[in-house]
């Protein structure tokens, strides 16, 4: 054997394989990798190092990160970002998760803070002057991704002022800019948000905040939409429905809203599925008690109550009687599937809607997060992460085609012993982790649970850390962990925009 000849042949083949002519192949391969994996591949050879620095690689990676994490499409100015900023932004979810994992009891320190200064109209100034305890801001809702923030003022004589703010793309320190303002009726508030079909607009669902404050307006659920990047953004009402009783829980998925409302005993609560684009509805009465949360997944309604989940199939929707839901014709139905949640010591359970309702194509869209709470004597809660999986053949027509299967569980028993109120926030997904936040007397703590690729039989060990916000004690908090941004509001209505990750602003 001619060793020199064979070695030369191998060297030539290797050189041809990794020649610049094949860089497009490597770029296509990187489209199947997560951003941290691209960084790992970059270290193997010069050709892959060069290919991994191509702008198209990180432009594609950031678009996939936004889609997989359910971030609002206009969160980033992709065209104006440098190649380095695209790479940094694509890695933000894993950087934030790493910060939480390696905190070792040391609170995460913010990189930048800004105070949101309200922009008042003359009418607002008059209302504030006449109000004894009116505040600029009474509630907030952060659009997934952290660039846009909805704020609601106190209720004045004309109603509550709802404003959409552009906080700037995550990782920068620009001053917030007011995008648009609308006035909602007295005691109406923003309940949920969702994207428009093209992903460029925001849909806003509003209802009333208390049963004893029901106004004369029978249209108790309204839907508005706004396109914040349009030349002249404006809130536009696109749907409204009459609701005879108080709405107890609600969620939105695509063009459909599902909500539950009270009913006079002994009648069970009424659950309504409403297509607000075509104004079609379907109502049914679960045989069980009052739901704590309701969601839509594919053609099924999922109802959470106490310590159980139940699934109902949604038939084709029909036009409502007159302009209302005829609750007298809503039938009492049994679910096609019901099972107990794996919680033993909890007082009550919730099925909160997470950010991934924003992205119908996200692999996390089929995940359900069930929370079980137990407040005495310690602040603690359990988590069960479900995945909607297709039933194996042969399929039983009496069962749903997709059923929830437990992926993993976590228990947070070591939280804080307190005698004050506890404020909890909806779950978020960040770099293959589930993140939940809990605020106790101004102390904000994050809990992180890894998402396994396959089902885990054992209970996972979660990670926790605290967020340092200085002497500022928040009453409310909105978090976008995939971009490292947090918005907090104090008891007196002061809002702060806090960034734990920053983009490199140097021009490359």
Image (tube, rainbow, N blue to C red):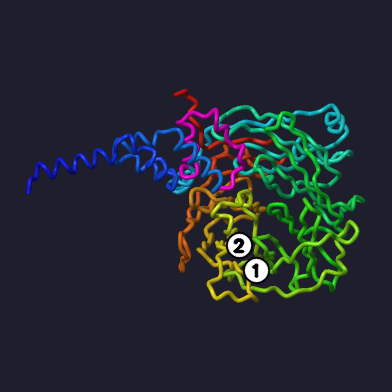
**Disc 1 target residue:** 309
Residue at image point 65% right, 61% down: 298
Residue at image point 61% right, 52% down: 360
Q: Quadrant of the C terminus?
A: top left
Q: Which residues are magenta?
A: 69-95
Sequence-first tag of 2 and 1 = 1
Is 81 colored magenta in this rendering?
Answer: yes
Q: Secondary structure at mark 1?
A: strand
Is 508 colored magenta in this rendering?
Answer: no
Residue at image point 51% right, 40% down: 62
- Predominant secondary structure, magenta span: helix
**Disc 2 target residue:** 370
**Dot 2 and dot 1 residues touching (CB under 8 Å):** yes
Count of residue discs: 2
From the viewer's perspective, is 97 left or right of 381? left
Instruction: Name the residue nearer the viewer: 16 or 87.
Output: 16
> Horizontal and vertical percent for residue 153?
78, 39
Q: Secondary structure at mark 2?
A: strand
């Amino acid at each position: 054997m001619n060793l020199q000849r064979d070695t030369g042949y191998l060297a030539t083949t290797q050189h041809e394989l990794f020649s610049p002519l094949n860089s497009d192949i490597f770029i296509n391969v990187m489209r199947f990798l997560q951003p941290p994996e691209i960084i790992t591949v970059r270290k193997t050879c010069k050709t892959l190092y060069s290919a991994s620095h191509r702008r198209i690689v990180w432009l594609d990676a950031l678009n996939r990160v936004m889609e997989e994490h359910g971030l609002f499409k206009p969160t980033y100015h992709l065209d104006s970002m440098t190649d380095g900023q695209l790479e940094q932004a694509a890695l933000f979810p894993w950087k934030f998760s790493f910060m939480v994992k390696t905190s070792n009891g040391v609170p995460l320190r913010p990189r930048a803070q800004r105070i949101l200064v309200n922009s008042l109209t003359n009418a607002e100034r008059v209302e504030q002057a006449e109000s004894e305890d009116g505040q600029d801001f009474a509630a907030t809702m952060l659009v997934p991704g952290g660039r846009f923030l909805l704020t609601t003022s106190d209720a004045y004589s004309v109603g509550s002022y709802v404003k959409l703010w552009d906080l700037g793309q995550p990782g920068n320190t620009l001053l917030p800019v007011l995008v648009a303002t609308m006035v909602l009726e007295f005691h109406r508030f923003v309940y949920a948000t969702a994207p428009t079909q093209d992903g460029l607009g925001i849909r806003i669902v509003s209802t009333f905040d208390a049963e004893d404050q029901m106004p004369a307006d029978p249209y108790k659920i309204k839907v508005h939409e706004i396109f914040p990047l349009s030349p002249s953004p404006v809130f536009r009402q696109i749907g409204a429905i009459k609701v005879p009783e108080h709405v107890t829980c609600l969620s939105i998925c695509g063009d459909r809203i599902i909500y539950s409302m009270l009913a006079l005993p002994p009648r069970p609560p009424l659950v309504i599925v409403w297509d607000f684009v075509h104004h079609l509805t379907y109502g049914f009465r679960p045989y069980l008690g009052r739901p704590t949360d309701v969601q839509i997944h594919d053609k099924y309604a999922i109802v959470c109550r106490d310590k159980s989940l139940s699934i109902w199939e949604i038939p084709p929707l029909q036009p409502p009687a007159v302009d209302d839901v005829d609750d007298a014709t809503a039938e009492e139905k049994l679910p096609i599937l019901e099972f107990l949640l794996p919680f033993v010591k909890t007082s009550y359970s919730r099925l909160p809607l997470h950010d991934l309702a924003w992205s119908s194509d996200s692999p996390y869209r089929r995940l359900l997060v069930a929370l079980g709470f137990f407040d005495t004597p310690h602040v603690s809660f359990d988590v069960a992460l479900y995945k909607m999986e297709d039933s194996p053949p042969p399929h039983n027509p009496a069962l749903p085609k997709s059923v929830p299967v437990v992926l993993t569980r976590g228990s947070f028993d070591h939280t804080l012993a307190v005698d004050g109120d506890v404020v909890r926030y909806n779950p978020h997904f960040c770099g293959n982790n589930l993140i939940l936040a809990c605020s106790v007397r101004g102390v904000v703590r994050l809990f992180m649970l890894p998402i396994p690729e396959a089902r885990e039989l054992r209970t996972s060990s979660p990670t926790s850390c605290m967020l340092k916000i200085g002497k500022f004690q928040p009453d409310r908090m909105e978090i976008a962990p995939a971009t490292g941004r947090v918005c907090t509001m104090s008891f007196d209505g002061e809002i702060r925009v806090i960034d734990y990750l920053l983009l490199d602003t140097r021009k490359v």
